[in-house]
Image (cartoon, grey):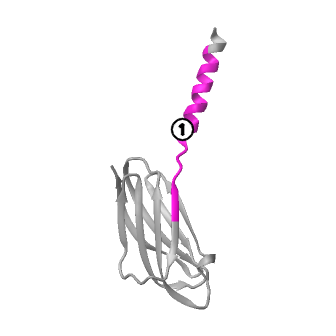
Amino acid sequence: MKKIYFIFIIFGLILAGCNLKQNYTMQYGFSNEIITESKFEETSDGFKLKIPFADFGCEIKKTKAVLERKEKTFTITIFDNQAAKRCSEKFFAEVTGIPKGEYWLKVIYLKETGQQEVFSQVLVID
């Protein structure tokens, strides 16, 4: 009988461990549409974001954006390619799968010369 209880406890711990991992979906892209201000919109399980860049690498296919979460802070890091030709671009992203709560959202622009925080906002998911 003790073995059955032990098996149920182990099985419960395994299931609990599987539920601790959270998945978020981020779709992002770049457009040469000219905008002059950042736009931020909270959704029921995430957010939508648009940020203008005036001095951005023109080789957009080589540019990457990564979403990370550390405790209550979501950080989007944009890795710019260091092309000689520079362009104006709009970065847009939509993130879903965030559970209810209050968080910080930061966007970091990373290039060879250093990094710059280009956006910071409180994010409340109801």
Q: Residues within 10 Å of mark 1 (few under 14, many from 20)?
A: few
Q: Which residues are magenta?
A: 5-27
Q: Quadrant of the N terminus?
A: top right
Q: Count all numbered tags in the image, as a single digit.
A: 1
- Magenta-span inclusion, residue 36: no
Q: Which residue is mark 1?
A: 19
SS class, disc 1: helix
User: Image quadrant of residue 63?
Assistant: bottom right
- The answer to whether 34 is drawn above or below residue 13 in the figure is below
Residue 9 relative to residue 55: left or right? right
Which residue is found at the position 41% from the left and 52% from the top? 45
Which residue is found at the position 50% from the left and 55% from the top? 69
User: Image quadrant of residue 124?
Assistant: bottom left
- The answer to whether 125 is drawn above or below residue 47 in the figure is above
Which residue is found at the position 51% from the left and 53% from the top? 24
Q: Amino acid at mark 1?
A: Asn
Query: x%, y% of residue 51?
Result: 42, 75
- The answer to whether 59 is drawn above or below residue 119 in the figure is below
